[in-house]
Amino acid sequence: MKRKGIQQMSWKGLAAFTVLILILPFLLSTSLMITKATFAGIYTIVAVGLGLLMGFAGQISLGQAAFYGVGAYSTAILTATFGISPWLSLLIAITAPALIAYILGHTMARLHGYYLAMATLAFGIVIHVLLVEWKGFTKGASGFYGIPKLELFGFTFTQGISYYYLVWAFALLVIILSLNIIHSRIGRALRSIHDSEVASSSMGVDTGRYKMQVFIISAMFAGIAGWLFAHMSYSISPGSFGLDGSILFLTMVVLGGSTSVWGAVFGALLITAISSFVQALGSKISFITSDFEHVLYGLILMLVVIFLPQGLFPAIAAKLKPFLEFTGRKKKSGSITAVKGDQRA
Amino acid sequence: MADSVQFLISGLTIGSIYAIVALGFVTIYSVTKVINLAQGEFVMLGGMIMFSLLKLGIPYLIAFLTTIAMVIMIGWLLERTIVRKAKGADALSLIILTIGAAIFIRGIASMIWGKDSVKVASFASNEPVSVMGATITPQSIWVMVFMLVIVAGLFLLIEKTMLGKAFRACSVNPLAARLMAVSPKKMSSFSFALSAGLGALAGLVIAPIIFPAYDMGVMLGIKGFSATILGGLGSAPGAVLGGLLLGVIESLGAGFISSGMKDAIAFGFVLMLLLIRPYGLLGEKNVGKGGL
C-alpha cells in the first residue's frame, strides 16, 4: 500500500481537528464548560498514550492514573516546596514516570497477559497509598495546596481560555507525535506485535524492547498530563490518581477504540462530555449521582466489548467512509488494506 | 511475642478470605480462561444482601442460605447475559468486560445501599477468646473453619464427583470434553455460579468483622486476584497459599510498619515476587505467559 495514502488522510484529519479545537472556546458559553474542555485535553494526552499501549503493543495498563499522579505530584513538590521553575519541573514530571515505567517495564518484558494487568494494578495502588501516606512530601489525603501558576515571558496562564489553548497545544503535539510513531518503523513493529507476538519475534522484531518503549512513552504522556493538571489547579489530592482514574482512562480508550490514535482522542472527548452532561443532570435530578456515572461507565465498557470490540471511532469512520471518499482518493489500493490503513491512521 | 501472634492470627483470618476469593478466580479461570475481576463484587453482595435480609427480620440461617442462592443467581446471570456473548474475544477485552461488570454492580449497589458501612451480626457469641496472649474473636475462627471446609468441599467436588470430572475435562480440553458429551457451555455457567457462591460465602463469613460497604469488593477482588497470581494462575493450592501469605504479610506490615501502608506493602511484595518468580509460587513455568 502506498505510504502517501495513510499520511494524507491523517494530516487532513489533524488539520480539521485543530480548527475545531481553535474555535471551540467561542462556541462554549460558560467558563465551566471551558474548564471541562481543558480537562478533555488533559485526558486526551493520557488516553492517547494508553491507546498506543493497548492498541499497538497489545498490553493493558490498569495503573495509568498512577503515572499521571507521579507527574502531578513531582511538579507540585518541586515548584511549591522547593521553588523550582515549573518549566524546569516539566522535565522531571516527564522523566520520573518514564523512569518508573522503565523499571516496571523490565518485569513487563517477561510478564504477559494477565500477569501484566496484575502488575500495573498493584503498581497503581502502591502509588496511591504512597501519595496518601508519605505526608512529609505529599501532604497526605487532604491534598497538596499552593501550586504556582505557569508563567511565560510575563504572561500568566490562569484557568480559562489561555490555559485551554496551552493544554490543547500540548495535546496536539502529543497527537502528532503519536501519529508519527505509528507511521514509523516502531509503529509497524508494534502493530506486528499486537497481531502476533510470536510471528513478529520470529521475523526479528525485538518485541520486548518495543513494548517497553511504548510503555515508557505512555507513562511520559501521562506525566505531561499530570504536570498540566497540577498547574491548572491550585491544589491536587490523591483521590484523582487512584483506581477510579485508571478505569476512567481505560473506559475512554475502550470506548473510542484503541486501534487508532483518533479513537483515544474521540473517547476522551466523549467521556468528558458524558460526564459533564451527567453532572449537569445530577444538579437537577437528585436520583442521578456520581454513582450513576459509574454505572454508566460499567455499562459502556460491557456494551463496547460485546458489540463494538474495535471501539466507536472505527465504526463511525467506516460509516462515514463513503462520504469521505468523494473528497479523497478513489479506492485503488484494494479495499481491505485501505480500510485497515484508515483505522490505524 | 503476643503482638506477633495477634498479627499472625488476624493475617490468617483475612488471608482465609483472600484464599476463598482466589479460589473463585481459579474456578472460573480453569474452565473459561476468563479472569473475572467482578469476583470481589460477589463478596460485597454476600455481605450486603445478608444485611438487608436480616434487617427484614428473616432468621439467620434462612437469610444465610437465601443470600448464597441470590448471589449464585447473579453470578449465573452474569455468565449467561454478558460473558457468553463476548466469547472468543481476546484476553484484554475479557478483562475489560469483567471490570465493566464490576463497576456496574458496584454502582448499582451504592444506589441501593448507600455509601455507609453496615453492621452484620456474627454467627454466634461475640466473646473473644485468649490464646497465647492474643485475643481471637469467635468470628475469625469461623472464617478459618469456613476456609478449610470450602477447600475440602471443593476438593471433593472436583476430584471425587462426576460433575467435577466433567469440570476438569472442560478445563483440560473443551473439544475433547464435548466429544464425550460434556457441555463446556454448561460448565462455564456452572463455574460462574460456583465461584459466585464461593464469593458469597466469603462475604457472609467476613461481614461481621469488617462492616461491609458497597465498595468493599474492590480491594477484596484485587487482593484475591493478587493471591491467585501469587500462587500461580490456575493452581488451586497456590491460590490458598497465596491468599494466606498475602493476608499474613499485610497484617504483619500493618502491625510492625504502618497500618496505612499495608496495601502498599502487600502489593509491593507481589510485585517483588513476580520479578523473581514470574509464574507465581506453585505455577508451572509454561503458565508463566500469563496463562495465555
Image: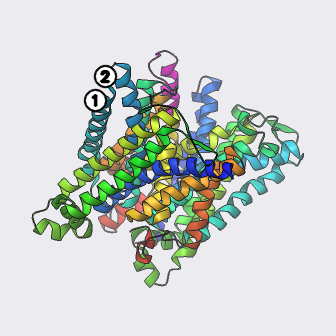
- Residue B237 in the image: state x and y as whole percent: 40, 64
Q: Which residue is mark 1?
A: B62
Marks 2 & 1, CB-CB < 8 Å contact? yes
Residue nearest the viewer, comparing B254 with A14: B254
The span picked out in magenta is A273-290
- Residue A297 in the image: state x and y as whole percent: 44, 38
Name which residue type carries label 2. Answer: Ile
Q: Which residue is mark 2?
A: B58
Query: From the viewer's perspective, is A48 left or right of A141?
Result: left
Residue nearest the viewer, comparing A71 with B1: B1
Q: Is residue B276 magenta?
A: no
Magenta residues: mostly which secondary structure? Answer: helix
Q: Secondary structure at mark 2?
A: loop
- Displayed quadrant of residue B232: bottom left
| Viewer can see residue A313 | no
Whole-angstrom CA distance, mark 2 to mark 1, is 7 Å
Which chain does the numbered disc 2 sit on?
A: B
The residue at 51%/76% (across/down) is A207
Q: Indicate the quadrant containing the C terminus of chain B: top left, top right, bottom left or bottom right.
A: bottom left
Are there few (<14), some (14-19), or many (20+) residues within 10 Å of tag 1?
few
Q: Secondary structure at mark 1?
A: helix
- Residue A324 in the image: state x and y as whole percent: 38, 50
- Displayed quadrant of residue B143: top left
